[in-house]
Amino acid sequence: MSLRKITITAGLLLAVGIVTSVANATHSWNGFHWGRTANPFTLQLGDNMSSTWDAYLGTAATNWSASNVLDTVVVSGKTKPRVCKPTNGRVEVCNERYGANGWLGIAQVWVSGEHIVQGAVKMNDSYFRTSTYNTPAWKNLVVCQEIGHTLGLDHQDEIFDNANLGTCMDYTNNPSANQFPNLHDYEQLEAIYTHLDTVNTVLSSGSATAGQGKPEGVGRDIDESDPSAWGQVVRRDAKGNASLYARDLSNGEKLFTFVTWAQ
């Protein structure tokens, strides 16, 4: 690990007060990962957010870039926040008043085989403008967690009342100590991306087209904001809410939707 990333990681761990070992946890999301032919790789995060969210997106990008195998960089967005359409080879991040539909944030990830090919993250201002969720802690946690899903990570723990693990990839009723990645998030990313691929599904920096190896059918037009289009319920959280959906797009292509519900 480079000195730069060791320094950043150490600062993050001190910031969230991590004092216990997390080395035994495993939270890879079924092994899904971005196809790339070299490490570290750079993943673009399209900024389709209002000025009230820009600092939180920037913080999340900086924190995930502490990984030794990838960097996330904020670039200009390519979609309207209301529809938040994905772009091949990168992740679009949006905020909008999506309505009192129950969800606080969602991460939608398109995969082809075992490779992630595009993603979209949405923050629902219908809730984030209320006194309960209009706080730095909730905003940091949710945007960090949803971006984490687009990297190939699942949750470290899914019991809301358990003690906080000091990571945004942990379900919680109190986000104060769960705003950023922790050491094992970085260790898990290293495990996920330890091998190299023969195809590249990541948009190259400055390139106008997606990486090689992405089938044309991925990302076909569907209404991704409508839960009825999310497909089958794969998993429910400890409160009984559907937290992960999967929609089969045929030819080995699928759309997964992770949901963080308002409490």
Image (spheres, helix red, strand yellow):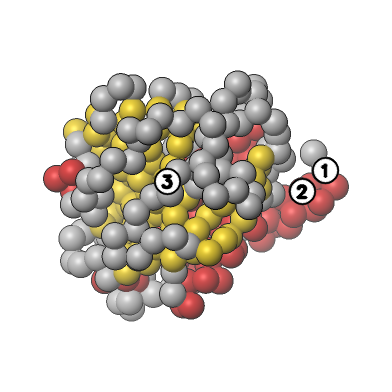
Q: Secondary structure at mark 3?
A: strand
Residue located at (49% from left, 36% from top):
152
Q: Which residue is mark 1?
A: 2
| Cβ atoms at labels 3 and 2 below 8 Å apart | no
- Mark 3 vs mark 2: give the one in front: 3
Upstream in sequence: badge 1 or badge 3 = 1
Image coords of residue 243 (percent x, y) = 28, 43
Image quarter in which the C terminus is found: bottom left
Image coords of residue 235 (percent x, y) = 27, 34
Are there few (<14), some (14-19), or many (20+) residues within 10 Å of tag 3? many
Give the answer, above or below, for where 196 lies relative to 44: above
Q: Secondary structure at mark 1?
A: loop
Q: Which residue is mark 2?
A: 5
Image coords of residue 254 (percent x, y) = 32, 31
Amino acid type assigned to the residue bearing label 3 in the image: Gly
Residue located at (46% from left, 77% from top):
52
Image quarter in which the N terminus is found: top right
Q: Secondary structure at mark 2?
A: helix
